[in-house]
Image (cartoon, coloured by chain):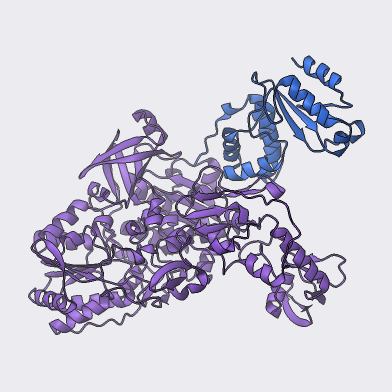
């Protein structure tokens, strides 16, 4: 691209020929105020704050939408520009309530800064201001129309990045209102971006409402712990409390998801256990660290080879994983992190960066709801679509991505994997419920360059099929894992034959002592009764975690560990890059990282615990998979999936975040609904192997008959009892 | 996924018209305004149901369709009477007595501006310039213009609409 020379306030810079005056000014270091410009949204020229004088142009030009020319001379420091800036600020403030003292945005507000720097001290407007009532959109965001300056950043985010959402501007001119049309909630997984893009206090986070002031927070850069994308976050801490998360660096994506932005308040939760506990006659009592450590070490010493097992959360950091692995080696025990019952290990995809996803020609997502497991990746896939790529989603459950792409079909839960296998073998007609247009589009996708994304639900057999077919056809492939650091745990060697195998051995008495770190197995392992039986028959159980959850109820010792905000570990992201966290606050109480506990225990046992994690050069070879494709038969087959707002780590202790998902839903087909005589919002009963559960029915268009999707992750609602090792099971469906 | 659109929502004639409108543009959503008009012509107004139906037709979020429909004052978003009386109260009409006309209609129909008669026949609203300043005061009933109004003339017009 050709470069051109532009002079701004006497400073000459060289910029690409398609740059705007504002971008050139940024390069020259000249400050041009703006509201509506956003580096990752298309320029709109709405707020008129960036008007500048251009030599040879009779009128002032908006810098954010005016393209540069070679030899252009721009002035921003003239009397004319100064006067127009004063005028624009005066207009912006006509109906502004000027409630900075109670506004959460104060301190990071564009309007406040610009008024201070470029505005007049007084206003000539003497009439009554038009004010609007505060509106809460669900438990996460609050909207103050009175403070809005109509820059449309939020609306542009919804149309340009989300490809349309229930958020827009209504009416016109001075009476314009911004908001949701269909409900009093904003129903997508990216509402936090509305808060982040709003330059003023019109859209703010309810978690942060009236909590503290931005200038009192100290920000530390860290990495999100809710999925493998590894978004960089800035944690705002004051007096050792985590108050706010901001996403200031566009890494890996300029956008962030609700999990990363809102699901953090468990860090400050009052129910956090901050001292080691030990069981004494059916009661858990607080004990000294030294006593806990020496008793655990004494116990573990007595077990022989294969009698101790470690089960870890896939979100523990690399150093913790290395420590657990080395401890497991020292006691000749078993270790595994695949707490969701996965039978696969991380595969190194041939996609090296998020830009490879965004520049793909065609993307096909199978075997999982990407917007729930890796939300920001879904936005990158949409970005590829907007750049001209064809995108398809074939999955048994999908809420966000499917309705925004070219090819979408909801597959029957029981035969999802065989159908995808058939498609990979070239049989496009196997996929049900496609229009002719979609079918031909899918054919085109399969015959050309393709990026295949395998979701977290895809079993090892399906992964093997995807892998071998991709190698054959020269396609790109990307395999997603659960947890934020599965790749790191794999690298540290923290795996054996699966969590199911460990639990079975515990049940049979072969494994006598169990250490569970950072996870509530009742919430994650898809067989609640096996977890219960195993924990009951374990001779010795140590739980390391933040909260006293259902798994901890069975423990002999409970050791408090640090959350991601207090620990400086590293995680390995989707593209096998190591990302380091910085500790943003002091560990609360006597909590410490898993590796520190293990080092203490190891020292007491006389074993050396090493916490130096190395990242594996290669991934797992899926062709080793011996398992068969997952196929479940039955009159009604249910797929159990964590609802988005219950899928974050420690979601039960993120009060506002988990509130968004009010009650567990069952997505049922129109035919089933008719047969049962239920309509949207009615109660249905799902009964199966381990019990009976009541759900709110959601009748979904395109849902195949005889296949339902039910929500997991709710408190005191152990739907994993319905399952038998995989997330799909035959059930019975009745009207409640 | 095969989209299922309830064709019965509009009459066959309107459905055919919509199909024709939507086939005219390379970008389907260019036809949105005209389709909104077509549906309003049949239903008289665009309620939430109609907005959602059109949104599904265009594969747009209902919020976006509502945004367009609410921007233009020519779309009625609430139920209106059989006859929608739009009296101009902009400068030329105001100088020529538009306010008297409004008051007269209010008295005659027993409703205030913005209301509908109980029998669902008339809705009275005031609008900005109808572009008929030369023959002020003017009003528009549904799609017909009535100009050089006097209270007597208004009586005659309204009576003829019974």
| Residue A674 percent across, percent down from the top left | 39, 29
Residue A326 seen anywhere in this rendered image of the structure: no
Instruction: Determine which quarter of the picture holds residue A688.
Output: top left
Q: Which of A414 and A381 is in front in this view?
A: A381
Left or right of A634 in this view: A90: right
| Residue B114 percent across, percent down from the top left | 69, 31
| The color chain B is rendered in | blue
Residue A274 seen anywhere in this rendered image of the structure: yes
What residue sits 86% from the left and 34% below the top?
B93
Left or right of A53 in this view: B34: left
**A361, above or below A491, in the image:** above
**A158, above or below B93, in the image:** below
Q: Which of A551 and A32 is in front in this view?
A: A32
Instruction: Determine which quarter of the picture holds residue A150.
Output: bottom right
Left or right of A579 in this view: A54: right
Q: Nearer the viewer, residue A255 or A82?
A: A82
Q: Nearer the viewer, residue A357 or A422?
A: A357
| The color chain A is rendered in | purple
Left or right of B126 in this view: A538: left
Total marks in image: 0
| Residue A303 percent across, percent down from the top left | 9, 73
**A135, above or below B49, in the image:** below
What residue sits 61% from the left and 27% below the top?
B10
User: Which quarter shows the N terminus of chain A?
Assistant: bottom right
| Residue A723 percent across, percent down from the top left | 24, 49
User: Which quarter shows the C terminus of chain A?
Assistant: top left
**A608, above or below A693, in the image:** below
């Amino acid at each position: 691209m050709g470069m051109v020379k532009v002079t701004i306030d006497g400073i000459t810079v060289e910029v690409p020929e398609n740059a705007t005056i504002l971008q050139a000014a940024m390069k020259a270091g000249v400050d041009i105020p703006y509201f509506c410009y956003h580096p990752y949204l298309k320029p709109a020229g709405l707020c008129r704050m960036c008007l500048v004088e251009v030599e040879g142009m009779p009128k002032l030009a908006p810098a954010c939408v005016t393209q540069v020319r070679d030899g252009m001379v721009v002035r921003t420091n003239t009397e004319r520009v100064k006067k127009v800036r004063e005028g624009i600020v005066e207009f912006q403030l006509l109906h502004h309530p000027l409630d900075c003292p109670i506004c959460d945005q104060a301190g990071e507000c564009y309007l406040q800064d610009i008024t201070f720097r470029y505005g007049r001290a007084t206003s000539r407007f003497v009439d009554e201001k038009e004010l609007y009532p505060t509106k809460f959109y669900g438990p996460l965001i609050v909207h103050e129309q009175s403070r809005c300056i109509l820059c449309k950043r939020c609306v542009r985010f919804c149309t340009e990045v989300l490809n349309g959402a229930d958020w827009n501007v209504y009416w016109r001119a001075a009476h314009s209102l911004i908001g949701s049309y269909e409900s009093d909630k904003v129903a997508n997984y990216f509402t936090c971006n509305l808060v982040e893009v709003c330059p003023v206090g019109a859209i703010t986070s309810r978690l942060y409402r009236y909590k503290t002031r931005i200038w009192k927070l100290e920000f530390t850069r860290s990495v999100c712990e809710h999925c493998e994308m590894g978004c960089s976050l800035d944690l705002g801490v004051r007096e050792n409390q985590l108050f706010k998360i901001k996403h200031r660096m566009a890494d890996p994506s300029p956008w962030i998801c609700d999990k990363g932005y809102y699901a953090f308040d468990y860090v400050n939760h009052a129910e956090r256990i901050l001292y080691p506990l030990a069981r004494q006659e059916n009661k858990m009592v607080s004990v000294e660290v030294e006593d806990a450590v020496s008793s655990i070490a004494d116990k573990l010493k007595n077990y022989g080879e294969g009698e101790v097992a470690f089960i870890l959360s896939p979100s523990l950091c690399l150093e913790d994983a290395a420590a657990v692995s080395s401890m497991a080696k020292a006691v000749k025990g078993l270790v595994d992190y695949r707490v969701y019952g996965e039978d696969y290990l991380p595969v190194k995809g041939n996609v090296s960066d998020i830009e490879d996803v965004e520049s793909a020609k065609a993307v096909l997502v199978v075997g999982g709801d990407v917007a729930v497991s890796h939300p920001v990746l879904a936005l990158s896939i949409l970005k590829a679509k907007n750049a001209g790529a064809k995108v398809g989603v074939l999955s048994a459950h999908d809420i966000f991505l499917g309705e925004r792409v070219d090819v979408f079909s909801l597959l029957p839960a029981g035969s999802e994997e065989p159908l995808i296998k058939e498609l990979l073998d070239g049989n496009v007609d196997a996929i049900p419920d496609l229009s002719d247009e979609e079918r031909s589009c899918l054919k085109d996708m399969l015959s050309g360059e393709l990026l295949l994304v395998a979701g977290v639900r895809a079993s090892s057999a399906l992964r093997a099929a995807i892998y071998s077919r991709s190698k054959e056809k020269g396609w790109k492939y990307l395999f997603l894992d659960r947890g934020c650091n599965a790749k790191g745990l794999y690298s540290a060697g923290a795996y054996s034959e699966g969590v199911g195998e460990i639990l079975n051995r515990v049940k049979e008495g072969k494994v006598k002592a169990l250490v569970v770190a950072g996870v509530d197995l009742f919430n994650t392992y898809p067989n609640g009764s096996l977890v219960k039986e195993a924990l009951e028959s374990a001779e010795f159980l140590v739980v390391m975690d933040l909260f006293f959850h259902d798994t901890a109820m069975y423990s002999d010792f409970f050791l408090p560990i640090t959350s991601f905000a207090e620990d400086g570990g590293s995680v390995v992201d989707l593209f096998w890059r190591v990302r380091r966290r910085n500790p943003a606050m002091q560990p609360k109480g006597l909590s410490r990282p898993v590796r520190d506990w293990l080092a203490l225990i190891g020292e007491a046992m006389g074993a050396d615990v090493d916490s130096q994690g190395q990242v594996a050069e290669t991934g797992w070879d899926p062709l080793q998979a011996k398992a068969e494709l997952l196929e479940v038969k039955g009159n009604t087959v249910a797929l159990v999936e964590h609802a988005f707002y219950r899928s974050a780590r420690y979601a039960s202790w993120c009060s506002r975040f988990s509130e968004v998902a009010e009650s567990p839903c069952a997505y049922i087909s129109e035919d089933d609904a008719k047969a049962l005589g239920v309509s949207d919002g009615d109660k249905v009963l799902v009964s199966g192997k381990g019990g009976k559960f009541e759900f709110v029915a959601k009748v979904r268009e395109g849902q195949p008959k005889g296949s339902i999707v039910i929500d997991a992750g709710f408190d005191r609602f152990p739907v994993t009892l319905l399952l038998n090792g995989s997330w799909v099971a035959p059930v019975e469906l009745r009207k409640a | 996924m095969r989209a299922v659109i309830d064709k019965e929502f509009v009459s066959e004639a309107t459905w055919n018209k919509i199909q024709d409108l939507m086939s005219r543009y390379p970008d389907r959503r260019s036809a949105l305004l005209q389709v909104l008009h077509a549906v309003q012509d049949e239903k008289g107004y665009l309620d939430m149901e109609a907005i959602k139906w059109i949104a599904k037709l265009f594969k747009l979020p209902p919020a976006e369709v509502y945004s367009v429909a609410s921007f233009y004052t020519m779309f009625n978003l609430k139920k209106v009477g059989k006859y929608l009386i739009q009296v101009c109260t902009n400068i030329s009409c105001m100088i020529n007595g538009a306010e008297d006309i409004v008051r007269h209609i209010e008295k005659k129909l027993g409703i205030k501006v913005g209301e509908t008669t109980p029998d669902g026949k008339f809705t009275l609203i005031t609008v900005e310039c109808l572009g008929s300043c030369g023959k002020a005061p003017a009003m528009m009933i549904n799609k017909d213009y009535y100009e050089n109004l006097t209270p007597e003339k208004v009586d005659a017009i309204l009576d003829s609409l019974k």
